[in-house]
Image (cartoon, helix red, strand yellow):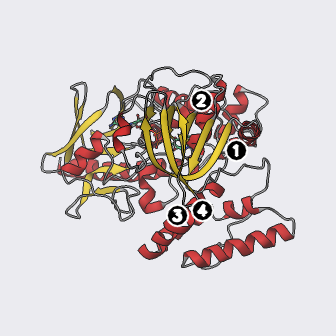
Amino acid sequence: MMTIAIIGGGFSGTMTAVQLMRKASQPLKVILIERNERIAKGVAYGTLCPLHLLNVPAKDMSAFPDDSQHFFKWAKDQDAAVTEATFVPRMRYGAYIEHILNDTLSHKAPNIEFRRLHGEVKNISLVNDGKQGRIELNNGEEVIADRIVLALGNLAPANVRIKNPQFYESKNYVRDSWSKESRPPISADAPILLVGTGLTMIDKALELKLQGHEGTIYALSRHGYLPSVHIPGIVRLPNPFENANLPKTVLELTKYIRAMVKRVEDSREANWRQAVDSIRPVTQQLWKTWNTTERRRFIRHMRCIWDVHRHRIAPEVGAMIDSMIKAGQLKIVAARVVSMEENASGIKVTVSPRGHHKETSFEVNRVINCTGADSNVKTIDEPLVEQLRNQGLLCADTFGLGPTITDTWALIDQQGKASDVVYVVGPLLKGQLWESIAVPELRGQAAQLADHLITSNDRVSLCHSESA
Ligand SMILES: Cc1cc2nc3c(=O)[nH]c(=O)nc-3n(C[C@H](O)[C@H](O)[C@H](O)COP(=O)(O)OP(=O)(O)OC[C@H]3O[C@@H](n4cnc5c(N)ncnc54)[C@H](O)[C@@H]3O)c2cc1C
């Protein structure tokens, strides 16, 4: 019986396990390993804050690529008020994935085994001439698997570069805004700095508001751009490249999008949101066809603009953030952090504002890193990634977006050899696919990887039966 171990029980890992158990026709053992107590939630859907809403409407959040209404129907069964355009609380989405896993387990075939392990994987090594992997957990447990899937997801953000990095030892600095690690309490009127102005900052600002925080919240990034807001119920535009060649350069793509936005807005047929969304089905293809120079150009000049237009927030969330800004509680700062120094009264933050040469300073009592997940496997200090890197089993892609992998998402080691054992799924595929963060892409990855692993299982079973 083939054993497939999946490390990471967030959306990607759980749905890979679900797809494996639903698709397998040969005996199979699936082991799902998660360091947090609960599986199926991950960073995004493990939140307990009711103000954290999905940033994708219900109609687009099915966990199955071949059943687009699956989530919407489930959510409507739970709450009749849900429509296709509703932005459902993220914790309810976590309950949906948990429901799918439980449902799969209660209907699985008798020759499919499932085991859940609670613990952090610290070490993976290849054994049996590199045909299997040994997985070691921090609680002393060990597992031998024929295939290992790294579904590590959203890893803690990197510290931003400042003059005095020793500040990062401070108890008043929170590097991972998603971690549940407790901190010394601060008063409700204390000023706080959120580094980053994207989706993580939005989450944190709302959470602070709900906790009754009244002090000033500074949110800072180089450009100071905030995510755009969805307009509910808008119609979809068809993929503009259905019967046309894809733009070969970033400049060509930019011109194309600008012209499309002008055309649809002039004709009042649609707005820029639909124009940006219409490219989504080909974003991965575009990224794959661009050479290194074009990819570098995109990252340097377009990434920031792309992110704020592509990753949008629910209208209700937009309205809450807007009112916090209008009330003067949330202050958006376009600047680069130069240094952060802790003293007896608080933390002196010195910044270089965008477009000015003169540095300025302000004081806060806590700094929370909201710059989003780090995926640079070359520098990241995540123990498992460090261990894989040190063993030479993993190396970083050109842009530090993830590990180098094959077209079927097997790890490529530092000698350039593709692994027969270790595979990757989820946001760490960003280097190869660029668009590899949200459910509409990840559900397809889980199904695709399961198909690939099952085909290799079938081949192994066939060889065994022929030689028997
Ligand atoms: C705050 C936030 C909100 C989001 N909102 C949306 C949304 O509304 N809609 C949408 O489509 N997408 C959203 N996303 C995108 C999100 O990345 C995906 O939807 C999806 O949740 C990613 O799942 P994942 O399993 O790949 O990663 P994760 O959810 O990060 O799960 C990875 C899991 O691996 C575990 N793990 C890591 N290393 C180890 C180890 N060594 N040993 C054991 N366990 C380990 C972690 O504990 C974690 O539970 C959001 C992302 C974030 C961060």
Q: Amino acid at mark 4?
A: Gly
Give the mark nearest the N terminus, 3 or 4. Answer: 3
Q: Nearer the viewer, residue 39 or 466?
A: 39
Residue 91, numbered circle: 2
Q: Label 2 vs label 1: CA separation?
A: 17 Å
Label 3: how many Cα within 10 Å (few below 14, some 14–19, many 20+) = some
Q: Element type at marker 3?
A: helix
Q: State yes or no: discs 3 and 4 in contact (Cβ < 8 Å).
A: no
Element marked by disc 2: helix
Q: Amino acid at mark 1?
A: Lys
* Disc 2 residue type (three-letter): Met
Distance in Å between CA atoms under marks 3 and 4: 34 Å
Q: Position of residue 56 (x, y in %)?
A: 66, 45
The image's mark for residue 59 is: 1
- Please tell me whether mark 2 or mark 1 is closer to you in this view: 2
Earlier in the chain: of badge 4 and badge 1, it is 1
Identify residue for label 4: 355
The residue that mark 3 highlights is: 284
Q: Residues within 10 Å of mark 1 (few under 14, many from 20)?
A: some
Residue at the image position 58 percent from the left and 58 percent from the top: 354
Mark 1 element type:
helix
Circle nearer the N terminus (3, 1)? 1
Q: Is residue 247 above or below residue 377?
A: below
Q: Outermost residue toward the left?
A: 129
Judge by depth and name the residue closer to the eye, 254 or 209: 209
Task: Give SS at disc 4.
Answer: loop
